[in-house]
Image: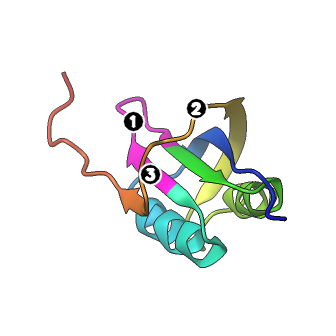
Amino acid sequence: MAEPAAAQRFLVSGRVQGVGFRVATQTQAQSLGLVGWVRNLPDGRVETLACGSAQQLAAFASWLEHGPRLARVDELERVPAAAPGVTEFRCLPTPLDYP
């Protein structure tokens, strides 16, 4: 029997914008079979919401602790979340100007 899906929200702080973090996160999530999204936040953090098995989410969190080569992750916050309601992992666009 398949393990039930769980959802997790991650907030990543550090040097995580302008270093390809969102695209690398999308690639990693897709390789793990997760669905959800990733986006930049106006305060300089990256937020991602992922849905999959506990094992998939643990592997994703482990990757997020370091991120891509040019990133520097200072803190990774994990928050339980509701399933994202999507069927793929998307990289959400970053608005040019935050409100």
Q: Which of the two discs, 1 and 2, sits closer to the camera?
A: 2
Is residue 90 shown left or right of residue 63? left
Q: Is residue 76 magenta?
A: no
Q: Nearer the viewer, mark 1 or mark 3?
A: 3
- C-alpha span from label 1 to label 2: 19 Å
Q: How far apart in space, not on screen, are marks 1 and 3 (Cα)?
A: 13 Å
Viewer-nearest of discs 3 and 2: 2
Q: Residue at x 39, y 44 (%)?
A: 40
Q: Is residue 42 magenta?
A: yes
Work out how far the residue at label 3 is from the one at label 2, CA to CA, in angstroms.
Answer: 13 Å
Horizontal and vertical percent for residue 90?
Answer: 38, 59
Q: Nearer the viewer, residue 50 or 15?
A: 50
Direction from residue 65 to residue 82 in the image, left or right = left
In the image, 90 versus 72, the foreground residue is: 90
Residue 83 point in image, percent of width and height: 56, 39
Q: Earlier in the sequence, mark 3 or mark 2?
A: 3
In the depicted view, which residue is nearer to us: 81 or 15? Answer: 81
Question: Which amino acid lies under the numbered mark 2 shown in the image of this protein?
Answer: Ala
Q: Indicate the secondary structure of the residue bearing disc 3.
A: strand
Residue for badge 3: 37
Q: Which residues are magenta?
A: 36-47
Viewer can see residue 53: yes
Relative to 41, say whether 23 is above or below.
Answer: below
Taking the image as shown, residue 30 lies to the left or right of residue 62, namely: left
User: Pointers 3 and 2 in contact (CB under 8 A)?
Assistant: no
Direction from residue 37 to residue 60 in the image, left or right: right
Q: Quadrant of the N terminus?
A: bottom right
Residue behind mark 2: 82
